[in-house]
Image (tube, rainbow, N blue to C red):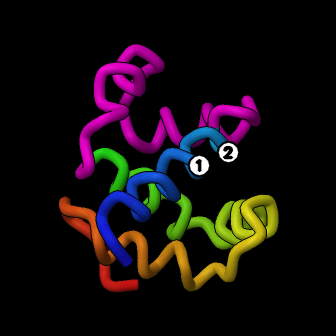
Amino acid sequence: MKQEQAETLALQALSFLVEDEDRLDRFLALSGLDQNDLRDRIADPAFLGGVLDHILGHEPDLLDFAAAADIDPTVVLRARATLPGVNPDW
């Protein structure tokens, strides 16, 4: 997967999180970010990798996101591997 494709998928995942207040609150609480940080870091590939880490770290969100995006959940894993930043061994 190319980095541009992975970034696009991560932006879709961020949109998925933002659309649901509970998901967004969980993401912000676990990441230590606030909504201003989201706007400031949206173009940072490492931040986008962190968004995918968050999705991958919570199976219900992963499955819901994959269904909403009409993709196989393993696509998220491949996209994460493409982006920079610290990523756990999934």
Name the residue located 24 percent from the left edge and 51 percent from the top edge.
46
Q: Residues within 10 Å of mark 1 (few under 14, many from 20)?
A: some
Name the residue located 52 percent from the left edge and 69 percent from the top edge.
56
Indicate whether residue 87 is drawn in magenta: no
| Most common secondary structure along the magenta stretch | helix
Viewport quadrant of the N terminus? bottom left
The residue under label 2 is which amino acid type? Phe
Vertical arrangement, residue 54 with respect to residue 80, above or below: above
Q: Are marks 2 and 1 in contact (CB under 8 Å)?
A: yes
Vertical arrangement, residue 14 with respect to residue 35, above or below: below
**Residue on which disc 1 sits:** 12
Tag 2 secondary structure: helix
Indicate whether residue 28 is drawn in magenta: yes
User: Which is more foreground, mark 2 or mark 1?
Assistant: 1
Residue 32 screen position, x and y as percent: 36, 33
Q: CA distance from mark 2 to mark 1?
A: 6 Å
**Residue on which disc 2 sits:** 16
Residue 41 screen position, x and y as percent: 30, 30
Q: Residues within 10 Å of mark 2 (few under 14, many from 20)?
A: some
Name the residue located 73 percent from the left edge and 33 percent from the top edge.
19
Name the residue located 30 percent from the left edge and 21 percent from the top edge.
40
Viewport quadrant of the C terminus? bottom left
Vertical arrangement, residue 17 with respect to residue 36, above or below: below
Magenta residues, start to end: 18-46
The residue under label 1 is which amino acid type? Gln
Residue 87 is left or right of residue 77, and the answer is: left
Which residue lies most toward the left here?
85
